[in-house]
Amino acid sequence: MALLTGDEIIEIAVRLEEWGESFYEAAAGNATTAGIKALFEDLALQEQSHRRAFEHMGRDLVQLALSDEQWEQFQAYSDALLRQSFFAKPENALNQAAHAEDERTALQAALGFEKEAMLFFYELRDLVKGGGRDTVTRIVEEEKQHIQRLSGMLAAF
Protein backbone atom coordinates (compact mmCIF):
# COMPACT_ATOMS: atom_id res chain seq x y z
CA MET A 1 0.00 0.00 0.00
CA ALA A 2 1.43 3.37 -1.02
CA LEU A 3 1.29 6.30 1.34
CA LEU A 4 1.14 9.92 0.27
CA THR A 5 2.37 11.97 3.17
CA GLY A 6 0.81 15.14 4.49
CA ASP A 7 3.88 17.06 3.37
CA GLU A 8 3.36 15.88 -0.22
CA ILE A 9 -0.32 16.80 -0.17
CA ILE A 10 0.44 20.20 1.30
CA GLU A 11 3.19 20.82 -1.25
CA ILE A 12 0.85 20.19 -4.19
CA ALA A 13 -1.96 22.28 -2.71
CA VAL A 14 0.33 25.16 -1.76
CA ARG A 15 1.83 25.20 -5.25
CA LEU A 16 -1.60 25.47 -6.87
CA GLU A 17 -2.59 28.30 -4.56
CA GLU A 18 0.68 30.16 -5.16
CA TRP A 19 0.14 29.95 -8.90
CA GLY A 20 -3.43 31.18 -8.50
CA GLU A 21 -2.26 34.09 -6.39
CA SER A 22 0.44 35.00 -8.94
CA PHE A 23 -2.05 34.76 -11.79
CA TYR A 24 -4.58 37.03 -10.08
CA GLU A 25 -1.97 39.59 -9.07
CA ALA A 26 -0.75 39.82 -12.68
CA ALA A 27 -4.30 39.92 -14.04
CA ALA A 28 -5.24 42.68 -11.59
CA GLY A 29 -2.21 44.66 -12.68
CA ASN A 30 -3.35 44.47 -16.31
CA ALA A 31 -7.05 45.08 -15.69
CA THR A 32 -8.47 48.42 -16.79
CA THR A 33 -12.03 47.98 -15.55
CA ALA A 34 -12.40 48.78 -11.85
CA GLY A 35 -14.78 45.88 -11.14
CA ILE A 36 -12.56 43.31 -12.84
CA LYS A 37 -9.45 44.70 -11.15
CA ALA A 38 -11.19 44.48 -7.75
CA LEU A 39 -12.33 40.91 -8.46
CA PHE A 40 -8.81 39.79 -9.40
CA GLU A 41 -7.33 41.53 -6.33
CA ASP A 42 -9.86 39.84 -4.06
CA LEU A 43 -9.26 36.44 -5.63
CA ALA A 44 -5.49 36.89 -5.15
CA LEU A 45 -6.11 37.51 -1.44
CA GLN A 46 -8.33 34.44 -1.20
CA GLU A 47 -5.72 32.26 -2.91
CA GLN A 48 -3.20 33.59 -0.38
CA SER A 49 -5.59 32.64 2.42
CA HIS A 50 -6.03 29.14 0.95
CA ARG A 51 -2.26 28.74 0.73
CA ARG A 52 -1.89 29.69 4.40
CA ALA A 53 -4.69 27.28 5.36
CA PHE A 54 -2.87 24.44 3.64
CA GLU A 55 0.46 25.45 5.19
CA HIS A 56 -1.10 25.42 8.67
CA MET A 57 -2.97 22.17 8.14
CA GLY A 58 -1.71 19.47 10.46
CA ARG A 59 0.68 17.63 8.19
CA ASP A 60 0.77 14.64 10.53
CA LEU A 61 -3.02 14.33 10.39
CA VAL A 62 -3.22 14.35 6.62
CA GLN A 63 -2.27 11.11 4.98
CA LEU A 64 -3.61 9.10 2.12
CA ALA A 65 -3.53 5.37 2.62
CA LEU A 66 -4.00 4.05 -0.89
CA SER A 67 -3.87 0.72 -2.58
CA ASP A 68 -1.20 0.44 -5.25
CA GLU A 69 -3.85 0.92 -7.95
CA GLN A 70 -5.36 3.98 -6.24
CA TRP A 71 -1.87 5.45 -5.77
CA GLU A 72 -1.03 4.99 -9.45
CA GLN A 73 -4.33 6.60 -10.48
CA PHE A 74 -3.86 9.54 -8.11
CA GLN A 75 -0.24 10.01 -9.14
CA ALA A 76 -1.12 9.91 -12.85
CA TYR A 77 -3.96 12.38 -12.32
CA SER A 78 -1.94 14.84 -10.23
CA ASP A 79 1.07 14.61 -12.56
CA ALA A 80 -1.11 15.27 -15.60
CA LEU A 81 -2.75 18.23 -13.92
CA LEU A 82 0.44 19.75 -12.61
CA ARG A 83 2.31 19.25 -15.87
CA GLN A 84 -0.28 20.88 -18.07
CA SER A 85 1.04 24.03 -19.63
CA PHE A 86 -1.22 26.12 -17.41
CA PHE A 87 0.20 24.69 -14.18
CA ALA A 88 3.69 23.60 -15.23
CA LYS A 89 5.40 26.77 -14.03
CA PRO A 90 4.16 29.84 -12.18
CA GLU A 91 5.29 32.05 -15.02
CA ASN A 92 2.93 30.20 -17.37
CA ALA A 93 -0.01 31.38 -15.30
CA LEU A 94 1.54 34.81 -15.30
CA ASN A 95 1.90 34.66 -19.08
CA GLN A 96 -1.79 33.80 -19.35
CA ALA A 97 -2.58 37.03 -17.52
CA ALA A 98 0.15 39.15 -19.06
CA HIS A 99 -0.61 38.14 -22.63
CA ALA A 100 -4.39 38.10 -22.40
CA GLU A 101 -5.76 39.96 -25.39
CA ASP A 102 -8.35 41.63 -23.21
CA GLU A 103 -10.10 41.35 -19.88
CA ARG A 104 -12.54 38.78 -21.24
CA THR A 105 -9.61 36.50 -22.12
CA ALA A 106 -8.12 37.01 -18.65
CA LEU A 107 -11.47 36.15 -17.06
CA GLN A 108 -11.73 33.02 -19.21
CA ALA A 109 -8.18 31.98 -18.26
CA ALA A 110 -9.02 32.56 -14.60
CA LEU A 111 -12.16 30.47 -14.94
CA GLY A 112 -10.15 27.64 -16.49
CA PHE A 113 -7.58 27.87 -13.70
CA GLU A 114 -10.27 27.69 -11.02
CA LYS A 115 -12.02 24.73 -12.64
CA GLU A 116 -8.81 22.73 -12.84
CA ALA A 117 -7.85 23.60 -9.27
CA MET A 118 -11.31 22.69 -8.01
CA LEU A 119 -11.20 19.32 -9.79
CA PHE A 120 -7.87 18.61 -8.16
CA PHE A 121 -9.14 19.56 -4.71
CA TYR A 122 -12.29 17.46 -5.21
CA GLU A 123 -10.08 14.48 -5.94
CA LEU A 124 -7.89 15.28 -2.97
CA ARG A 125 -10.87 15.73 -0.64
CA ASP A 126 -12.22 12.32 -1.55
CA LEU A 127 -8.91 10.72 -0.60
CA VAL A 128 -7.82 12.70 2.46
CA LYS A 129 -8.30 11.02 5.80
CA GLY A 130 -8.16 12.78 9.13
CA GLY A 131 -8.35 16.39 10.19
CA GLY A 132 -7.47 17.91 6.83
CA ARG A 133 -10.67 16.83 5.11
CA ASP A 134 -12.72 19.71 6.56
CA THR A 135 -10.13 22.23 5.40
CA VAL A 136 -10.08 20.80 1.89
CA THR A 137 -13.91 20.78 1.83
CA ARG A 138 -13.99 24.46 2.84
CA ILE A 139 -11.49 25.35 0.14
CA VAL A 140 -13.50 23.41 -2.48
CA GLU A 141 -16.54 25.48 -1.53
CA GLU A 142 -14.54 28.69 -1.84
CA GLU A 143 -13.21 27.60 -5.24
CA LYS A 144 -16.84 27.08 -6.32
CA GLN A 145 -17.56 30.65 -5.28
CA HIS A 146 -14.59 31.85 -7.33
CA ILE A 147 -16.05 30.07 -10.37
CA GLN A 148 -19.46 31.64 -9.75
CA ARG A 149 -17.98 35.12 -9.39
CA LEU A 150 -15.85 34.78 -12.53
CA SER A 151 -18.79 33.32 -14.49
CA GLY A 152 -21.00 36.18 -13.34
CA MET A 153 -18.42 38.75 -14.39
CA LEU A 154 -18.06 37.07 -17.79
CA ALA A 155 -21.84 36.99 -18.26
CA ALA A 156 -22.05 40.70 -17.46
CA PHE A 157 -19.08 41.57 -19.68
Image: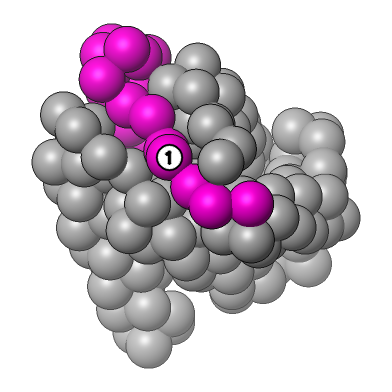
Question: Which corner quadrant of the image does residue 156 belong to?
Answer: bottom left
Query: What colouring does the structure picture have?
Result: one colour
Q: Residue at coordinates 19% horizontally, 33% vertically from top-left?
A: 130
Residue closer to the observer: 133 or 23: 133
The magenta stretch spans residue 83: no
The reply to whether residue 90 is in sight is yes
Q: Which residue lies furthest to the front in this view?
A: 1
Position of 28 compared to 53: left or right? right
Position of 53 compared to 25: left or right? left
**Vertical arrangement, residue 13 with respect to residue 139, above or below:** above
Position of 20 compared to 47: left or right? right
Question: Which corner quadrant of the image does residue 153 belong to?
Answer: bottom left
**Quadrant (top left/top right/bottom left/bottom right) for the C terminus:** bottom left
Q: Residue at coordinates 26% horizontally, 20% vertically from top-left?
A: 61
Q: Write down the residue under mark 1.
A: 65
Report the number of numbered marks: 1
Q: Position of residue 16 (x, y in %)?
A: 56, 38
The magenta stretch spans residue 48: yes
The reply to whether residue 121 is in sight is no
**Quadrant (top left/top right/bottom left/bottom right) for the N terminus:** top right
Range drawn in magenta: 46-68
Residue closer to the observer: 30 or 110: 110
Question: Which corner quadrant of the image does residue 50 belong to?
Answer: top left
**Vertical arrangement, residue 157 with respect to residue 14, above or below:** below
Q: Residue at coordinates 67% horizontally, 71% vertically from top-left?
A: 105
Q: Where is residue 7 in the image (x, y as percent from the top left)?
A: 50, 16
Q: Where is residue 109 in the image (x, y as percent from the top left)?
A: 64, 65
Q: Where is residue 29 in the image (x, y as percent from the top left)?
A: 59, 36
Q: Assign a secondary structure to mark 1.
A: strand
Position of 77 compared to 135: left or right? right
Query: Magenta part mainly helix, strand or loop?
Result: helix
